[in-house]
Amino acid sequence: MAAADSVKKPSAGGKATPPPKSSDSGIMKRLPRLAFVFLLALVYRQLQAPPPKIPGTPGGPPVTSPRIRLKDGRHLAYHESGVPREQARYRIIFMHGVDSCRYDVLRVSPELARELGIYLLSFDRPGYGESDPHPARTEKSVALDIEQLADALELGPRFYLTGFSMGGEIMWSCLKYIPHRLSGVAILGPVGNFWWSGFPANVTLDAWNVQVAQDKWAVGVAHHAPWLTYWWNAQKLFPASSVIAFNPAIMSRADMALIPAFAYRTHTHQVRQQGEYESLHRDMMVGFGKWSWSPLELEDPFPGGEGKVHLWHGAEDLIVPVGLSRYIAQSLPWVRYHELPTAGHLFPMAEGMADVIVKSLLLGDD
């Protein structure tokens, strides 16, 4: 009887009641979808850079230098050297390169500064040192930051500019967007964007092939997939940017002799203190990004001869290939080109070189 009672009886309609579905089978069907969602979340997390440690905020580094407040609310930290601003005959704003800060200014000798009355103003580019990050940074925005800095410190209607490496690249932006504020410009070993229009394919290809393989990948990612820039330079599967990783393969013989002065700076800890994404990685995304114009399209900013543009580059530069600078100088007759045959990328740090560069800019000495 017990066995008979366990048999399901037909329902009133004559059909047997089906057994309840197992909850396990539903879970099994959902597992692939859940795994896919989990994988997407994991990938998304890997692609996201940690938030920057903004100076002067809870958890951020302290503010130790004077800063100005820009129109959009950001702060720029700056450093003054040379003669006092009020006594200066010449006022020069210097823009540092990648992995540097406001203290990495041209080392003009005190004697020359006093003789000519030179005032030097350097500042932390956005995301470096003690300047606030700028997630919307473009090649144009940095030029406008410079103009606001000059006005805040009352440098007058015109001033001189000089920039090195990634800061040198932005000198082209200043010549495009604020030429009316400039008395002269010195561009030192500027980074070149391989996707600027107007360059013959062979010139771009020759410059591209000077790079080590890991930089070709890192630069290509920054241009074609900027959203991958953080992950590419943070992961350990493939070599990241050689500059970020301090790969000695990119140092020329001349650079190796100068690297101690760069590597053992007392302020090194300040350079990346906000994190690498809004400083080094943002540099790559802007510098190698998709510009709507090319330096080859620029017109003479000083048609009346009231100022000069000087372009300097080391022929043995393995970090920033010289080829693009050569072609720009050949194409723009108003650019005074200085190619240093045995120099690498760090030539502005060589003993006495800063004085040579500044005298050329201010006095026209070639």
Image: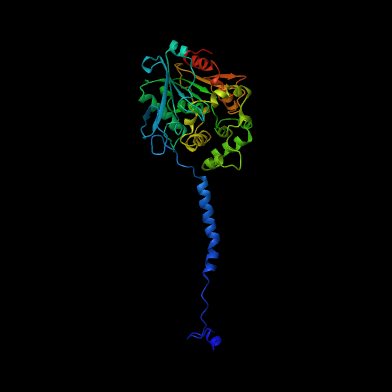
In this view, the residue in front, 28 or 359, is 28
Q: Residue furthest top?
A: 115
Instruction: Name the image quarter holding the C terminus.
Output: top right
Left or right position of 208 against 179: right
Image coordinates of residue 349 in percent, x first then y, are 54, 21
Left or right position of 85 against 303: left
Q: Which residue lies furthest to the front in this view?
A: 2
Residue appearing at x 49%, y 31% in the figure: 269
Residue appearing at x 59%, y 42% in the figure: 236
Image coordinates of residue 31 in percent, x first then y, are 54, 61
Question: Colour scheme used in the picture?
Answer: rainbow
In this view, the residue in front, 301 or 105, is 105
- Is 289 situated above or below 4? above
Q: Which residue lies furthest to the bottom in this view?
A: 1
In this view, the residue in front, 89 or 80, is 80
Residue 60 lies in what quarter of the image? top left
Residue appearing at x 39%, y 39% in the figure: 58
Image coordinates of residue 188 in percent, x first then y, are 53, 23
Instruction: Name the image quarter holding the N terminus.
Output: bottom right
Image coordinates of residue 131 in percent, x first then y, are 42, 32
Left or right position of 335 against 70: right
In this view, the residue in front, 295 or 154, is 154
Q: How many labels does the image show?
A: 0
